[in-house]
């Protein structure tokens, strides 16, 4: 097996294992995800995977985007079905609407760098409700889960370096890593200061 394929598979496997842990916490009621964030990540995750695959032209690089796409949709559907989301504020609704507008703009102009940049900007922006939620109540999320998800993207960054084509290829893993770390660090710091 190709070394970069093994690295990509390792990163994806780590992501999926951590995701299973996250879903276990959701199912048991140990955390309360934000519906707005996960709705946007579910919808835009599909668009991100498609535009990132086109942008990079490399399914090995895009494997993490497809993994995130599937897990984001699964998280939204399972948490919605179980009623595990906490209530949405006006800000959450506004961010959800902005994300859906971005999806429409993506459909109107699906050129890879533009489309992927637009989708990733909205994915990052849509983390705000989750960040505000963990700032108010850090028990809504577990920092270790988010930090481990961020670490899983290091494998994709190494794969990109070894299969270098363009700096555009870095957009997705850097954005995903930053979003995951921001939630993990915010939740961890708030837990320290609150209790």
Image (cartoon, rainbow, N blue to C red):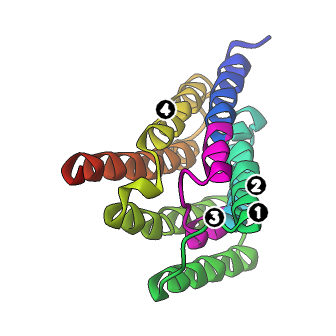
Q: Earlier in the sequence, mark 4 or mark 1?
A: 1
Q: Nearer the viewer, mark 1 or mark 3?
A: 3
Q: Earlier in the sequence, mark 2 or mark 4?
A: 2
The residue to which callout 3 is attached is 84
Q: Secondary structure at mark 1?
A: helix
**Residue occupying the point 69% across, 28% down:** 13
Q: Earlier in the sequence, mark 1 or mark 3?
A: 1
Q: Nearer the viewer, mark 3 or mark 4?
A: 3
Q: Nearer the viewer, mark 2 or mark 4?
A: 2
Dividing the image into 4 quarters, which one contains the N terminus?
A: top right
Q: Which mark is residue 74?
A: 2
**Residue occupying the point 51% across, 40% down:** 145
Q: Which mark is residue 151?
A: 4
Q: Secondary structure at mark 4?
A: helix
Q: Secondary structure at mark 3?
A: loop
CA gap between label 2 and label 3 equals: 13 Å
CA gap between label 2 and label 1 equals: 5 Å
The residue to which callout 1 is attached is 77
The answer to whether 9 appears left or right of 129 in the picture is right
Q: Earlier in the sequence, mark 2 or mark 3?
A: 2
**Residue occupying the point 58% across, 73% down:** 36
Percent of width and height locating residue 152: 55, 32
């Amino acid at each position: 097996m190709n070394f970069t394929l093994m690295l990509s598979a390792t990163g994806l496997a780590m992501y999926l294992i951590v995701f299973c842990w996250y879903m276990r916490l959701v199912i048991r009621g140990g955390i309360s995800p934000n519906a707005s964030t996960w709705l946007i990540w579910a919808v835009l995750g599909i668009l991100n995977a498609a535009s990132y695959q086109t942008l990079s032209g490399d399914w090995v690089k895009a494997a993490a985007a497809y993994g995130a796409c599937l897990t984001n949709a699964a998280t939204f559907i399972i948490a919605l079905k179980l009623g595990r989301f906490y209530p949405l504020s006006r800000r959450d609704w506004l961010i959800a609407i902005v994300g859906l507008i971005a999806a429409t703009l993506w459909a109107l102009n699906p050129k890879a760098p533009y489309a992927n940049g637009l989708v990733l900007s909205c994915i990052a922006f849509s983390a705000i409700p989750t960040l505000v939620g963990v700032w108010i109540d850090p028990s809504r999320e577990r920092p270790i889960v988010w930090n481990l998800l961020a670490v899983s993207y290091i494998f994709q960054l190494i794969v990109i370096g070894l299969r270098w084509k363009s700096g555009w290829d870095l957009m997705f893993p850097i954005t995903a890593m930053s979003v995951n770390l921001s939630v993990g660090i915010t939740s961890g710091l708030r837990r320290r200061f609150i209790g």
